[in-house]
Amino acid sequence: MAFPNSAIVNHNRRAWQRMADSGHRLAKPVSECELAAPLAAVDSVGWLGPSIAGWRVLCLAAGGGRHGPLYAAAGGIVTVVDFSAAMLERDRQAARQYGWNLRLIETSMDDLSALQNAEFDLVIHPVSSCYLPDLRPMYREIARVTKPGGIYVSQHKQPASLQSSLAPQRGHYVWLHRGDGQPLPPAGNDQLIREPETVEFAHPLGVLLGEMCCSGFVIEDVMEPQHADPVASEGSFGHRACFIPPYLRVKARRREETCAPQGAASGRLVLDE
C-alpha cells in the first residue's frame, strides 16, 4: 500500500506543533554553554574543518531554536527549513535575542522549491528521514540545492532501532517490525527513541545510504554517535543503546557535476529574509 507524502507530512506537522507547544526536549532553544563554542557543539568530530565563516548553510527540518542559531553563531549564512511554524518560531525568537539574521522557510523537507539550485555550501539535516515514506524526492531536492563539492551532513534513526522493541522482553530487546515501507505502530509516549503521535518509517540502509548516493552524493564518513551507558538500568535509553545504536550520522559530498534543472516556481511561504 502506498502512503501519500502529503497526508503523512500533515499528520507529522500537527504532531510536531503539539510537541513545540508542550515544550518537548527537541523544541528547546540553544544554550549559552553551546554558544560559547558553537562549531564544536554541532561538529564534535571535525567534519567541517576549523571554520564555516561565510558558508551558506541550510538547516533542513531543523527548527526549534538550536541548529540555526549555532551555525549562525559559527559564522554561517543560515537558512532554516521546517514544516512546523511553532518550531520556526523558536528560531525567530533566538535570532531576535542574539541579533542574527536567519532566513526561515516553512515547508516539508521533500519540497525545497523556494530554494535555488546549488545555493548551499553545507546542508545539515538532523534526524527526520523517518517521517517520510519515500526518501527519493527528498534526496533529489537536497542534491539540487547543494553546490558541487558541497557537504551534506545528516543523522538518521538506525533501522534496527526502529524495528526493535523499546523495552526488553524476558531480558532481551527483540525484533518486532519489518522495514517494508509500512508505517510503524504507534510508540506511545516514548520521549527518546520515538516521538509521540508521529508516523515513522524504518528505512533500510540500502535506502538511507543507497538513495543518497543515487541522488548525486559520495559518502565520505559514517559514524554511530555513542549513547551507550553500561551501568544504566535495564530498559533505559542508555541500556538499550549498548545493544542497539540508536542513530547513524553520515558525511557526504555533492559530486562535481552539473546540477539538475531548476525546480518549479516557489509556492512556499518564506517567513524571513
Image (cartoon, rainbow, N blue to C red):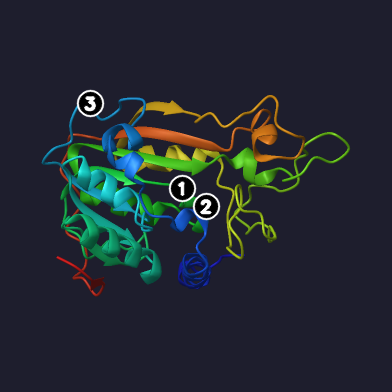
Which residue is at 15% across, 58% downward? 101
**Amino acid beneath label 1:** Val
Establish if 176 lies above or below 48.
below
The residue carrying pointer 3 sits among few (fewer than 14), some (14 to 19) or many (20 or more) residues within 10 Å by Cα, namely: few
Q: Secondary structure at mark 3?
A: loop
> In the figure, residue 41 lies in which quadrant?
top left
Which residue is at 21% across, 54% downward? 98
> In the figure, residue 40 lies in which quadrant?
top left
The C terminus lies in quadrant: bottom left
Q: Residue furthest left?
A: 54
The residue carrying pointer 2 sits among few (fewer than 14), some (14 to 19) or many (20 or more) residues within 10 Å by Cα, namely: many
Q: Which residue is mark 3?
A: 49
The residue carrying pointer 1 sits among few (fewer than 14), some (14 to 19) or many (20 or more) residues within 10 Å by Cα, namely: some
First reached walking from the N terminus: tag 3 or tag 2: 3
As drawn, is 209 to the left or to the right of 79? right
* Residue 71 appears in the rendering: yes
Query: Where does residue 192 sit, x and y in percent of width and height?
Result: 60, 48
**Amino acid beneath label 3:** Gly
Q: Which residue is mark 1?
A: 127
Mark 3 vs mark 2, foreground winner is 3
Establish if 86 lies above or below 252.
below
